[in-house]
Amino acid sequence: MSSWSIDKSGRFPQRLFLRAAEIDRDCERLVTAFLQQRHGNVSFPISTDDLTVLVDQHSSSLDLYADLSDEGDDVEGMTCFLPDEPPQVLISIQLTEQANRQNRLRTTLAHELGHAFYHRAVFDQLFAAPPHMFEAARAEPRTVCKRDSMMGISEFDWLEWQAGYFSGAILMPAQQVRRAVGDLLRDRGIHGAAVIGTPPAAEAERHTMASFQVSAEAAQVRLRKLGLLADSAGPPTLFG
């Protein structure tokens, strides 16, 4: 169950605390219910069109062709929070229009969905606080997704970590990945995590990329988190 605690960064009145397993569970429920309602069945990869519909359902507006150049050359997505209404989601036109970057577009859409899904309550607390408090966050009520910062986020940056983990969990739901990759590894005599750099690990990554339409980097990060890949041989863990 999610909980609240003091935000030691001082940016918000409180921080939302979520465990990885909670995000996995929320994402599994969300994407399963959405696909079942929209298509009458649940299959992966979730399409980019379905992702945009899902983002649209959890935002007041979705702009897939936003000019974010004023935010910096590396900004690919943004979620803007508003008092008393769902957030606005903006995706850089430079990302949307590059046909060879569809996996990155999907990851960015899922990342911004994570912000919209979890963090409206965080900003609602901010908007309800006295005007003289939390002035920096109030002046910039938004989250910015940069090109090189989505995969290796530390839990200290809790807003981005939660959205980043959500992105992987929506695109690659835990049960689906464990079933597909776990079966593959067991067929090769591996009951636990495959060691990165070995043929079984490479095969697991390729299988995940193809099954869920994600990049090699996203696949490896997700498999690590789920304890299906590791740097060295050892027992499987929840977080990799």
Image: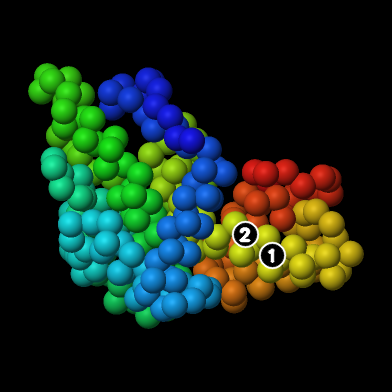
Q: How many marks?
A: 2
| Image-based side of 73 in relation to 222, left or right | left
Q: 151 or 223: which is nearer to us?
A: 223
Q: Where is 218 relative to 187, above or below? A: above
Which kind of residue does numbered mark 1 sit on? Arg
Q: Quadrant of residue 13?
A: top left
Regarding residue 48, the answer to whether it shows in the image is no
| Image-based side of 31 in relation to 231, left or right | left
Disc 1: CA contacts within 10 A as few (<14), some (14-19) or many (>=20):
few
> In the image, what residue occupies the spot 70% across and 50% down?
227
Q: Where is 46 relative to 150, above or below? A: below
Q: Which residue is mark 1?
A: 179
Q: Secondary structure at mark 1?
A: helix
> In the image, what residue occupies the spot 29% across and 76% down?
97
- Residue 221 location (% of width, % of height): 59, 54
Q: Where is 223 relative to 144, above or below? A: below
> In the image, what residue occupies the spot 17% across and 20% down?
133
Q: Secondary structure at mark 2?
A: helix
Q: Where is 7 relative to 55, above or below? A: above
How far apart are the alpha carbons under marks 2 and 1?
Answer: 6 Å
- Residue 42 location (% of width, % of height): 51, 73
> In the image, what residue occupies the spot 68% across and 60% down?
178
Label 1 near label 2: C-beta < 8 Å? yes
| Image-based side of 223 in relation to 127, left or right | right
Q: 90 or 4: which is nearer to us?
A: 4
Q: Which mark is residue 175?
A: 2
Disc 2: CA contacts within 10 A as few (<14), some (14-19) or many (>=20):
some
- Residue 51 location (% of width, % of height): 37, 68
